[in-house]
Image: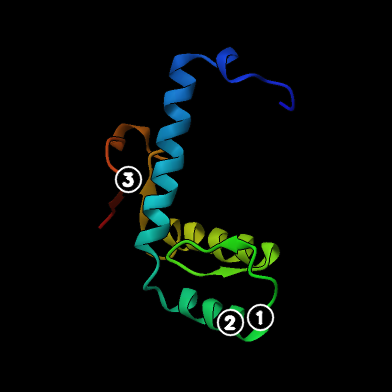
Amino acid sequence: MNRVKYRAISERARGQLKLHVLDSLGCAIGALPAEPIAAIRTHLEDFGGNPACTLIGGGKTAPDRAAFYNGALVGAALRGKGLISSYFAPRLSGTACRIVS
């Protein structure tokens, strides 16, 4: 999909894309207090680097480190904290994440 134009994507697909992006961000924000995330953040600060990219929750770091940290946030939310995103549970869509107990 390297040459798809926005207008060529169906209205339904655009809506789903928006939902999944917002859902992922909501899950990532929910995982900010997780202990593994705090450890990763500490390492990022220790490593330093060119602060070119934004971290979810604030701050900046090098692109590779930002990708690792931001991806870890979403992964931690979905796995470690028992959250289900709308992508994995479309019948529960309508909010960013639901806690499964």
Q: Amino acid at mark 2?
A: Glu
Residue sitting at the far bottom = 46
Q: Is residue 83 above or below residue 93?
A: below
Front one among 13 and 98: 13
Image quarter of the N terminus: top right
In the image, 3: left or right of 20? right
Say few, some or many: other residues with alpha carbon within 10 Å of mark 2 (under 14 / 14 to 19 / 20 or more). few
Tag 1 near tag 2, CB within 8 Å: yes
Q: Quadrant of residue 93?
A: top left
**Which is nearer the N-term, disc 3 or disc 2?**
2
Marks 1 and 2, Cα distance to the nearest angstrom?
A: 5 Å
Marks 3 and 2, Cα distance to the nearest angstrom?
A: 29 Å
Which residue is at 43% across, 33% downward? 18
> Mark 3 or mark 1, which is nearer to you?
1
Q: Amino acid at mark 1?
A: Gly
Residue 48 - label = 1
Q: Position of residue 38 (x, y in %)?
A: 46, 79
Q: Quadrant of residue 6?
A: top right
- What element does badge 1 sit on? loop
In the image, 14: left or right of 30? right
Residue 96 - label = 3
Badge 2 is on which residue?
A: 45
In the image, 92: left or right of 45? left
Which residue is at 28% across, 55% downward? 99
